[in-house]
Amino acid sequence: MAMPQRDETIEEIKRLDALLEYAVMHGDEAEAARLRAELAKLVEKV
């Protein structure tokens, strides 16, 4: 049986990772830093 909260967290991590990759590819360092911080906060909860 899948745990919906866990699945949502995994999807959020994937989404943020994709956005981070996009920001880095396009040289948006401010957005990349913001996304890294958001990812760090999310991972701390796990």
Image (tube, rainbow, N blue to C red):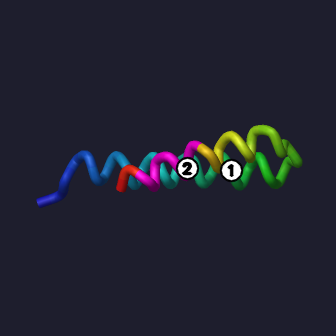
Spatial CA span between label 1 and label 2: 9 Å
Residue in the foreground of this view, choosing between 31 and 40: 40
For the record, the magenta segment spans 38-44
Q: Which mark is residue 20?
A: 1
Q: Residues within 10 Å of mark 2 (few under 14, many from 20)?
A: some
Label 1 with label 2: CB-CB less than 8 Å: yes
Residue visible at 80% across and 53% down in the picture: 24
- The three-letter code of the residue at mark 2 reads Leu
Residue 6 belongs to magenta span: no
The residue labelled by disc 2 is: 39
Residue farthest to the bottom?
Answer: 1
Left or right? Give the position of 13 relative to 19: left
- The three-letter code of the residue at mark 1 reads Leu
Q: Position of residue 10 (x, y in %)?
A: 39, 55
Residue in the foreground of this view, choosing between 7 and 34: 34
Residue visible at 51% across and 54% down in the picture: 14
Residue in the foreground of this view, choosing between 44 and 30: 44
Report the number of numbered marks: 2
Q: Position of residue 3 (x, y in %)?
A: 19, 53
